Amino acid sequence: MSGFRCNLRKSLQGEVPVSAVGLGQEPETWLTKRGLVVFETHIRRVTVIGAQRGALVVAVVALGGLSFSAPASAAIPSASGGTGNDISFPQCGGGFPSGQPFGIVGVNDGLSDNLNPCFGPSPLYSESELYWAVSGSSGTTTQPKASLYVNTDDPGDVYNGSLIPDWPSSGTTPYGLCTTTTVMTNGGPSTAGANSTACAWEFGDQEAGQDVSWLTAAAAAINGQSPPIAVPTGASGYPWWLDVETSNTWQTGSTGQAMNIGVLQGMVSGLTAAGATAIGVYAASNQWDAVTGGTTAATMSLGGLEDWIPGAGTLAGAQTNCGAGSFTGGSVTLAQWTSGGIDNDLICTATSTPTPVQIYGADAVGTSIAISEQEFPSAGSAKAVVLARSDFFSDALAGGPLAALAGGPLLITPGASISSTLDPRVQVEIQRVLPTGDTVYILGGDLALSPSIDTALEGLGYHVIREAGADEFATAVDIAVQLGNPSTIFEATGLNFYDALSAVPAVIKEHAAILLTDGSNQAPETAAYLAANPGDTRYAIGGSLAAGGADPTATDIAGQDLFNTSADVASNFFSSPSVFGAATAADFPDALGGGVFMATGGRMGPLLLVNPSTPLPPEITPYLATLSVGTQGYVFGGSLAVGADVLAALQAAVG
C-alpha cells in the first residue's frame, strides 16, 4: 500500500532476500511488539517486482505452488472512470488528498501487529486518516466514503531463535485444535503454539479482532471531539481489504502455504464475526499465488472475494489491470496506480455477468452434501453439523442461523417415517467435515429423526444435541435459546417453507433467529418467547395471511406472493450484494442449505425463489436488475430443480 514497509524478517532468516534501492534516505530500525527488528523507510511511492509501485524495488523469491486462472465464465471488468485514494502511515503529518469520491485507509503501519499512528486522532481529529476518509469523501454508487485495509502476515511460532509473543497456543478452529509443541529457541527448548494450520487460523482470527478493536477506539475518539462527525464504530460500517504482499513474513512450501491460507481464512472469519459484510483482497496475482499456492472459487472463505489490483504507474495501466483475471475466482473491483506520490484507485466495472454456479447432487440429500463440500472443502474444517429431516420442512426452517453460528453445514437425511438410520452418504460427509468430539445438532424430536441416529453418531465419537420441542414452534424457540436469545427476531409462518427460507440469509446477516407462526395466528410458544423478550426487534416475513397477520406490530416485509416476498427480503437487506442465490420454490431441501451458504464463508447475499423452468417470476426481475453487472450467482439443485434456461435467464437479468 502507500508508503510500503520493507520487512526483513525473512532475509534475516535467510529465506527470502529483500533489497531496497534508490530510497533516497536512510532506513530506520525499530522494535515491534513481537520483538522483531524491522526496517522502515518513509516513502510514498514503491515498486514491487510484479506489482510496481514507484521507486522501491523488492526482489521476491517465488514460493512456488499452483497457478490459477479465472473461470472462463468470469465477468470481464472495465474501468468506470471513478477514482479515489488510499493513504496510510507514510502520510502522517503531511497533506492528505482532497475532493476524492472515496478513501481507503490503512489500519496498520505496515505490519499486522502495529497500529497506524494516524488512523485515529493524533492528537487532533483533523489529523486522523479515518476522519479524512469519512468526512472528506463524497461516496459513489459502488464505493462507500470510507474503506479499510489491514496488513497480513504469517510469522509462525519462532523467528530467528525467538518466540513470537502473539502466536497463539490454543483455540478451536475449522482445522481442529491449536495445540502446543516444543520448539528450539536461542535460550533452549521452549513451549509454543504449533506451526500448524489450526494455530495459523487462530492467529488470523485474533489479528482481525485486534484490527476491529483499533477501529472502534479510533472512531469513538473522533466521535467524542467537537465538532463531532458520525464515524461508524463497527466493522459493518466499512468494506475491508486484506493486504497480501510477499514482502511481509510468510511461511514457505506447501505446508507453509496451507498455514498462510489458514491465517487469511481466520482473518475473514474474525472480521465476519465482528459484523463485516464486505471483504476483499489487495494483491498482485503473482504474490497471491506465491503466498497461498493459488486458490480457486471453491477455496473456503477466500474463493470469490473481490480483488483490488496494484502495480500500475499510470491510469492506462490501471485500466488494463481492471481487465485482469481474478486470482480469487471473484471479480476485480479496484485497480491502483501511483502518480506524483499519491495512490489513486480506479473503480472497475464488469461488462458481463458470469453464468451462475450450480451446486447439486443426485438428489436432495446429495445436494445438501454438495453444498457442504463447497462450504467446507477441507477435511475437518467445520466446527459443528446441523442435521434435519429431508422429507418435511417444519423443524428445519429455523436451523439455518444455528448452522451459521455453529460454523458448520446444514445436512439432511430421511425422516423417521422413512428410515431409522442415517443416510450413509451423510455419515461419510459428517466424518469428512467434522472432527470427532465436536457437536452434531439434530433438529426435531424422535418422530422427526430416529433416536438410532443419535446412537450411531455418538458411537462415531460425536457429541449430539437434540433441538426438539413439542412441535415445530417449540423447536424454533429451542433453537433461538441455543443461539443465545438474539435481540432480533424474524417471524415466518410454519405452515409452509417459502417465507422462512427466503429470510435465512438476512437472518444470518442480522445475527437473528427465526420463530414460527401458525399461519396468520400466533403460535403460543412464539407468543411466550416474544413476551419474555419485549425489547427484541421483530420482522414479520409474509403478509396478513402469514406472519404479518400473526404479529401486526412487527415490521412487515411481504409481497403479494412467495416470489415477491423473497424479492422484498432481498431489497430490504441486500441492496448491493456481490453475490446472489436462487433455488426452486417447488420444494424446500435445496433452499435449506443454500440459504446458509449465501451468508457464510465471506459471502453475503440473498436467496431468491424461482420456478424449475422459465420464465423467471416477474416479481424477482426488478431486484435482479438493480444488481451490478458481474454479480456472481449461485443456484442450488440440479437441472430438474432449476433448469439451464433459468440459469441463462438469471444471468441475463442481472444489471
Image (cartoon, helix red, strand yellow):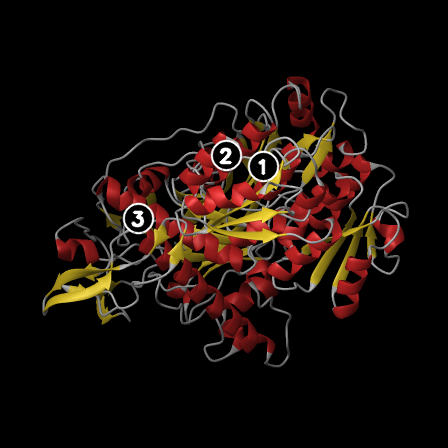
The kind of secondary structure element at disc 1 is strand
Q: Earlier in the sequence, mark 3 or mark 2?
A: 3
Q: CA distance from mark 1 to mark 2?
A: 8 Å
Within-10-Å neighbours for mark 1: few <14, some 14–19, many 20+? many
Q: Nearer the viewer, mark 3 or mark 2?
A: 2
The kind of secondary structure element at disc 2 is helix
Three-letter amino acid code at the position of disc 1: Ile
Observer-nearest residue: 258 or 403?
403
Circles 1, 2 touching at the beta carbon (< 8 Å): yes
Residue that numbered label 3 is attached to:
259
Q: Earlier in the sequence, mark 3 or mark 1?
A: 3
- In this orientation, does residue 55 appear? no
The kind of secondary structure element at disc 3 is helix
Observer-nearest residue: 334 or 379?
379
Q: Quadrant of residue 380?
A: top left
Residue 412 image label: 1
Give the quadrant of the N terminus: bottom left
Residue 597 image label: none
Q: Is residue 173 left or right of residue 592?
A: left
Three-letter amino acid code at the position of disc 3: Met
Could you say where residue 547 lies in the image, as x and y percent from the top left? 83, 50
Q: Is residue 317 left or right of residue 651?
A: left
Could you say where residue 535 lies in the image, as x and y percent from the top left? 75, 70
Q: Residue drawn 43% across and 68% down?
A: 94
- In this orientation, does residue 56 appear? yes
Residue that numbered label 2 is attached to:
426
Q: Is residue 107 left or right of residue 170?
A: right
